[in-house]
Image (tube, rainbow, N blue to C red):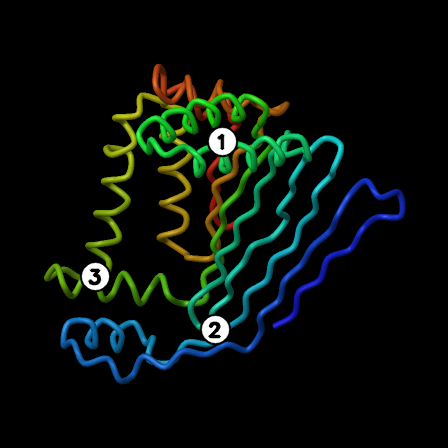
Amino acid sequence: TSASMSVSDDKNSIGFDLDASGFKADLSDVTDPATKDAIEKLKLQALSGDMTMSGSWEVASGTVDVEEYAIDLDDVGRLNMSFGFSGYTLAFIKSMQETVKAQAANPNKEQADQAASLAMLGLMQQLSFVNAEISFEDASITKRAIDYAASQQGMTSDQLAQTIKGMAPIMMASLNVPELQNMVSAAINTYIDDPKNFSITAAPEKPVPFPMIMGAAMGAPNTLPKMLGVTVTANE
């Protein structure tokens, strides 16, 4: 493993990265019959792969940009997450530390927890959502997973695949977001037919304050996909 941090020449930003390469896990000695059967059918007796992470923090704006946070497993796939938010300034960090200290110093735990919760809600108003993405690049695990799940259900792999494709729009319909429903259904159909990669991205035109997101989630959750610029794609 290796990790490093670097400060820009103008002292305005900090870069960081982490790499853990060549790790392995031996699952062949699992004794539970059901778990052992699943591991063998999915061919996960021996796992190996790498983990990487990289990003930066702009001190003045408090913008955190995690460009990559990935786990890549041989013969399984690569799961990567990236995200960005702003407002995480030195003043914000100091306020958080003071809130935690005040909570620990208050002997009345219930009162301390309430005060800390209110303080954290106030601090959340300083943060804004910039972007996020989660993606998966298949390395043969999807087909094995469908084959195994189908065998457990007494179905053929093709029958299960068609069932998944048929259920996707029905499950998404409850969200009352037709555009997102169509995107998700199309992406699932494409991926199931030929598993390569699958991505969910949120990229609003401009940063969205966290209180707005929380308010929409409680009052009108069907507006969130448009507010956050959500797209779902496969095999692109």
Dot 1 lies on which element? Answer: strand
Q: Position of residue 43 (x, y in %)?
A: 32, 76
Q: Residue at x 57, y 46 (%)?
A: 82
> Residue 54 is drawn in which quadrant?
bottom right
Residue sitting at the far bottom:
29
Amino acid type for the residue under numbered disc 3: Ala
Amino acid type of the residue that numbered disc 2 sits on in the rendered structure: Asp
Q: Position of residue 224 (x, y in %)?
A: 43, 23
The local secondary structure at tag 2 comes to: loop
Residue at 50% across, 61% down = 78
Number of the label disc, if any, that sits on residue 74: 2
Q: Position of residue 94 (x, y in %)?
A: 63, 34
Identified by mark 1, the residue type is: Val
Upstream in sequence: badge 3 or badge 1: 3
Distance between mark 2 and mark 1 Cα atoms: 29 Å
| Badge number at residue 230 | 1
Question: 59 or 204, which is in the foreground?
Answer: 59
Which residue in the structure is indicated by mark 3?
149
Whether 162 is drawn above or below 21: the answer is: above
Q: Residues within 10 Å of mark 3 (few under 14, many from 20)?
A: some
Q: CA distance from mark 3 to mark 2?
A: 21 Å
Discs 2, 1 touching: Cβ within 8 Å: no
Q: Which mark is residue 145?
A: none
Q: Name the one closer to the observer, 92 or 236.
A: 92
Label 2 Cα crowd, 10 Å radius (few <14 / some 14-19 / many 20+): some
